Every structure is written in structure tokens, then in C-alpha cells.
Image: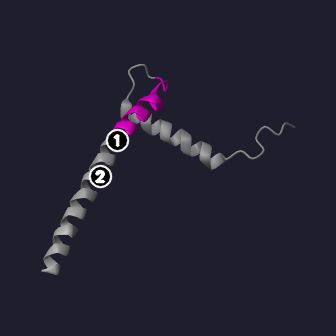
Amino acid sequence: MSNILLGWDTMGEQKKADFMEHLYQVYRPVSHCYTGLWEQFKVEAAMHCREDYFERLKFVEEVKKELGNELCFEMT
């Protein structure tokens, strides 16, 4: 018997399949194929992460500014 499935992560592979099915339901490809769904998701995820990054930077700057104002107020 072959050892090809030795160490196979059944749950991990099922999670991959479940996520691909989710992507299929979200994107509803006209071709009715799974081809390209992961690539489309990666592009959209990257755009979201980039926007999230800049929103977080803005939030940190606002908090720093607010804390700086409070520290100045407490000193007077």
C-alpha cells in the first residue's frame, strides 16, 4: 500500500475545500468553474489589507495626538 496519504491533514484540506466553496458562492463565476477564484480573492484581500493598514496608521496618529493633548492639559 502507498504512503501517499501518510501525514495527510484531512481537516486542513477540508477547510481549503470549504473556503473555495465559499468563494464560489460569493463570486458566482459565469464560467461555473473554480478556476481563478483564489486569485480574485487574493487581489481583493490585498486591496482590503492595504486600506486597513492606512486606516490603522491614521487611528494611531489620532490617538497619539489625543494623548499628547491630554498630557499637555494635565501638565498645566
Of tags 2 and 1, the one toward the viewer is 2
Per the picture, the main secondary structure of the magenta-coloured stretch is: helix
Magenta stretch in the rendered image? 33-48
Residue 70, position in %: x, y?
Answer: 17, 73
Residue 28, position in %: x, y?
Answer: 37, 29
Which of the 4 quarters of the picture holds residue 67?
A: bottom left
Most extreme residue toward the front, as rendered? 76
Asked whether residue 45 is drawn in magenta, I would say: yes
Q: What sort of colour scheme is used for the picture?
A: one colour
Q: CA distance from mark 2 to mark 1?
A: 11 Å
Amino acid bearing label 1:
Arg
Mark 2 residue crowding within 10 angstroms, few (<14) / some (14–19) / many (20+): few
Q: Nearer the viewer, residue 11 or 40?
A: 40
Number of numbered labels in the structure image: 2
Amino acid bearing label 2:
Leu
Q: Along the horizontal axis of the image, is 47 left or right of 74?
A: right
Mark 1 lies on residue: 50
Most extreme residue toward the right, as rendered? 1
Q: Along the horizontal axis of the image, is 10 left or right of 71?
A: right
Q: Nearer the viewer, residue 30 or 44?
A: 44
Residue drawn 60% across and 47% down? 12
Q: Along the horizontal axis of the image, is 23 left or right of 63?
A: right
SS at mark 2?
Answer: helix
Q: Is residue 19 above or below residue 27?
A: below
Mark 2 lies on residue: 57
Residue 76, position in %: x, y?
Answer: 12, 80
Residue drawn 51% across and 42% down? 18
Pick whichever of labels 2 and 1 is earlier in the sequence: 1
Asked whether residue 57 is drawn in magenta, I would say: no
